[in-house]
Amino acid sequence: MRTSLYIFLFIFFNNYLYAQISDFKSVDFTRADNIAKLNEGASLENLPILAYQLTNTLPSEAEKFRAIYMWVCQNIKGDKAQFNKVAKNRKKFQHDSISFMKWNHEYKRIAFKKLLKRKKTMCTGYAYLVKELCYLANIKCVIVDGYGRSVDANIKKLEMANHSWNAVQLNNKWYLSDATWSSGYLNEYNTFVTVYNDGYFLTDPVLFGKNHFPIKQKWALTETLTAINFVTAPLVYGETFENNITPIHPQNMDISINKGDEITFSFKSATDVMDKNISLVHYVGTKERKMKIFNTVHENDIISFKHTFKNKGIYDTHLKINGAIVATYTIEVTRG
């Protein structure tokens, strides 16, 4: 009975996972990308003109949204100063959410002025600009507020909401995108580096939910995402989205097993991954050690393999695809 249930859930997950991503397989976004590029550096002083320039020659809602999204990602920079200010006040009001919301509402006006004048912002500004340009192009788009999960936020429990992104309606169906995390990152010198990550554009809800949890459940666009499985799932990264990898098993980041136990690791990939480009590693200090994997199986876009933990200890374990870490687990191996 348990095996039959597992097979049912596996098939359901498998069929559902890329139901949305395939909706736009036949759409060529080259023209939309070129239009965004041609308007590089355009002013934000007149948003109706910008929206018209980006969308008026494109035939479909998907292409229009793509041009808007690409332009925002390539022309707006992340602002570390704003991020630090909000983080500081989020910590200050961590036990008084009403006061934080009041402060944040007032601060948004300052942040939006800075966005329009200097093209620098944080997540709320990215989501706001995408929404406004979509409105001017007659595309339904909303800002979704919620929790972004990273190496230092929303690990093991939900903290105060810290992120915003967009839900957009295309062809009468809602999709999720995150222009902030598509646009680039802050390096170790707190300098914003513009590097586009297409993995956050019209992302499948199941993959999106690996590091996004909305305050309003309806914007998860999937009934399988809960607060508990959000904070206990393996940690994922930008490279997870770049490679379009969805970790499936183990379902939890923290795992406790007995010495000699085998663990099956599995993930879904939108593209074929060669065995030589799949690895499992763990770190001892700063030194990376490769772990032996076996029984690698490819079936219906699902790839699985096994590893036996022969020695007790705590293993900082990472799944790597094409040389990039895409999922992290903490595995405690006891004597049993």
Image: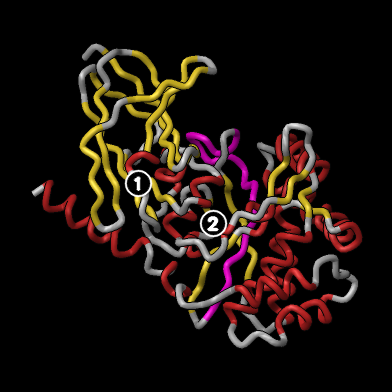
**322 above or below 135?**
above
Q: Quadrant of residue 115?
A: bottom right
Left or right: where 252 falls relative to 82: left
Q: Is residue 154 magenta?
A: yes
Report the Cα–Cα distance between label 2 and label 1.
Answer: 20 Å
Q: Nearer the viewer, mark 2 or mark 1?
A: 1
Residue 234 versus residue 297: which sits nearer the camera?
A: 297
Name the colour scheme: secondary structure
Element class at badge 2: helix
Residue 57 versus residue 7: which sits nearer the camera?
A: 57
Q: Quadrant of the C terminus?
A: top left
Element class at badge 1: loop
Q: Which residue is labeled 1 in the image?
A: 274
Residue type of the residue flagged with mark 2: Gly
Q: Which residues are magenta?
A: 152-170
User: Is tag 2's residue or tag 1's residue first in the polypeptide sequence?
Assistant: 2
Near mark 1 (Cα within 10 A), the count class, few <14, some 14-19 or many ≥20, is few
Q: Which residue is labeled 2 in the image?
A: 199
Residue found at x 21% / y 37%: 295
Residue 308 spot, x, y in % from top left: 24, 24
Residue 47 spot, x, y in % from top left: 83, 75
Residue found at x 73% / y 64%: 72
Residue type of the residue flagged with mark 1: Met
Near mark 2 (Cα within 10 A), the count class, few <14, some 14-19 or many ≥20, is many
